Image (cartoon, coloured by chain):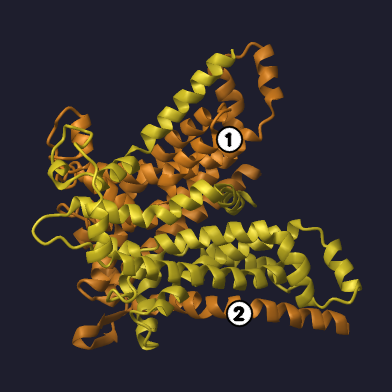
Amino acid sequence: MTGARRADRRAALLFLAPALAMLAVVSVYPAVWVFWLSLQYRIPIFDVARFAGLDHYLFLATDPRFLNAARVTLTFTAISVALELALGLMAALLLRGQTAGRQVALSLLLVPWALPSVVTAKLFEWLYHPSAGLVNFLLGGQSHNWLGDPRLALPAVILADVWRTLPFVALLCYARLLGISPEIYEAAQVDGAGPLGTFRRITLPLLRPVLLIALLFRTLDALRAFDLMFVLTGGGPANTTETLTVYAYRSLFQTLQLGLGSAIGITVFVLVMLVAWGYLAALRREAR
Amino acid sequence: MRRKRHGVDALVLLLLCAFAVPFFWQILTSFKPDADLLRLPPVLPSRLTGVHYMAVWQRSVIPRALVNSLGVAGITTLLAVALGLSAGYALARFRVPGAGALLLAVVAGTAFPQIAIVSPLYLLIRFLGLRDTWTALILADTSFALPLVIWLLTGFIREIPIELEEAAALDGAGRLRTLRWITVPLVAPGLLSAGLLTFLASWNEFLFAYTFTASESSRTVPVALALFPGVFEVPWGDIAAASILASVPPVLIVAGLGRFMVRGLLAGALRE
């Protein structure tokens, strides 16, 4: 190795060191520690701290509350991501032709995405108010208790989530649509393809990569979602909106079982990893 | 044909306005007198009032929370961009052994769920005596933002032609001077994009802020809003006013600097 090369490498490490040190202490170290924590009984207020082995995981395997939380998480993820992709794509198609007021249109679209999720929760809590809420009023003076009725609470939370994340999907699709050259469409028109045929044969295939990326990002985010249900319903009524993240949080900081809560957190991590792995495997199979 | 185009444009704008109604509704609510709040119809109030904003401003913890949020998000942004610029420069411009693997690990890091890291981080922060301080939130938010910032800035720096930096080096400028006077000005829009996304994420962050704070001395706006007190009945007007105040920075960013934010968002999602 030449002297210049070695000096280069030393400079590189110097430039990298601050960020890596920060990540090592505040991200990597806790991320490893949580696995160890999940193997312990740890209840700080009673000074309990002893090894539990796989007890928490064995408990969770037959815990009805955990199985319910897993089902709620998967239902929430599947329905909200499907709606976000479909509606986001539609919004992008609508926006594509926009000539006047494009900036205003984009701002209107992006505000829901940029708001703090706690604000979104407060917005929808008020919209869902049983007697003075806009939703019941627009439905013709109904008096549904959206957040208190076990059958309605999860759909209500999903709707709020779709509202705040659809703009992300729309934006990705819109950016891709702007990149498609108009000549392709002119050619299709010359060939006599109708609007539906053009959409199916040209637009959709060209959008596919972007839709897949949106699918991955949105699925990972939905599996990890926490703020919205925690503030909007707190997991209720009757645990119908209690996702794995809310169950983990309640175990960690409301009943103060740090070990059990960490174990639930790790199941969320495993879910996320499974989805990412499945996605990459599908991509690789397609590339071949 | 042109007239038809305008018609469609107006229709799309109208649809988007309808989409944003939940937010507009909250703005309207924040100006409604108490007597009109729990009655619907009428949709429009008999008169508009500023009492909710006065109440929030004078008798709630929201002003203090706004200061905390601005401080935490501001410092987090500066710190994350500074550390990210340094790391991104190294990854883009030096032959670092294992740079590819490092970048991949950084990307994978963004998938780690907050809920899985919050318990050990809580113990770490308690051990360091940082509970209920800005420092705890700044540390947590910065390390959470860093992967995306490093990823974005590495990409943006790679887009700059290296010849400019080489020319500066030939003229005898050292690494730091070249970074300061050549690279930083050229990557400034990228720094703004990364900074805006970091600021938004930190301003909106709830789980860490809710867990690591214990009093109004460090509670951020989302936490203060989630814990907004109601004595006998829920003060919907005050909550509406508080949530509009909490929305001011995000709305300003989207309306004024949306271009830069979108660029960062797209680069983060689409660059392979």
**Quadrant of the image for the N terminus of chain A?**
bottom right
Q: Position of residue B139 (x, y in %)?
A: 47, 76
Query: Which of the chains bears the disc numbered 2?
Result: A
Left/right placement of residue A219 relative to residue A247 reads right
Identify the hue of chain B: yellow
Residue at disc 2, secondary structure: helix
Type of amino acid under label 2: Pro
Calculate the distance from the C-alpha at mark 2 to the C-alpha at mark 1: 39 Å
Q: Residue at x 24, y 42 (%)?
A: B48
Across the whole image, how many numbered discs are drawn on residues? 2
Asked if one can make out residue A72 in the rendered structure from this viewpoint, the answer is: no
Q: Residues within 10 Å of mark 1 (few under 14, many from 20)?
A: some
Q: Which mark is residue A55?
A: none
Against A233, residue B19 (above or below) is above
Residue B173 in picture, x, y percent from top left: 84, 76
- Numbered tag placed on residue A18 in the rendering: 2
- Please tell me which of labels 2 and 1 falls first in the chain: 2
Q: Amino acid at mark 1?
A: Leu
* The C terminus of chain A, quarter of image: top right
Chain letter for the orange colouring in the rendering? A
Q: Which residue is mark 1?
A: A207
User: What's the residue at 16%, 52% (across, down)?
Assistant: A237
| Secondary structure under the numbered disc 1 in the rendered image | helix
Q: Chain of mark 1?
A: A
Look at the image and tell me whether residue B15 can be seen: yes
